[in-house]
Image (cartoon, rainbow, N blue to C red):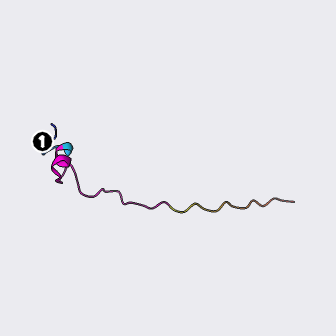
Amino acid sequence: MGKGDQKTRRGKIFRGTYGKTRPRNTDKPSIAAPPPAAPKKRTTKK
């Protein structure tokens, strides 16, 4: 269970291969952070 084991994630990283334990792409889509909204102006009652 180390670098020489092809079935473990560490072994796949060491050999540079992909598979079930080390998929190529992540399931989560990369979402860019939305730009910060401008602060809202407060209206006061008179």
Indicate whether 46 appears above or below 13. Answer: below
Give the side of residue 38 with respect to residue 30, left or right: right
Residue type beneath disc 1: Asp
Residue 14 falls within the magenta-colored stretch: yes
Q: In which image quadrant can residue 8 be found? A: top left
Q: In front here: 4 or 8?
A: 4
Quarter of the picture holding the C terminus: bottom right
Q: In front here: 2 or 34?
A: 2
Residue bearing the label numbered 1: 5
Residue 39 falls within the magenta-colored stretch: no
At horizontal 16% and vertical 53% (from top left) the residue drawn is: 17
Q: Main secondary structure of the magenta part?
A: loop
Which residues, given as a range, are shown in magenta? 11-33
Label 1: state its secondary structure. Answer: loop
Indicate whether 8 appears above or below 39. Answer: above
Return the x and y of residue 11 as percentages of the image width and height.
Answer: 16, 44
Return the x and y of residue 28 as percentages of the image width and height.
Answer: 35, 57
Return the x and y of residue 12 as percentages of the image width and height.
Answer: 17, 48
At horizontal 73% and vertical 61% (from top left) the residue drawn is: 41
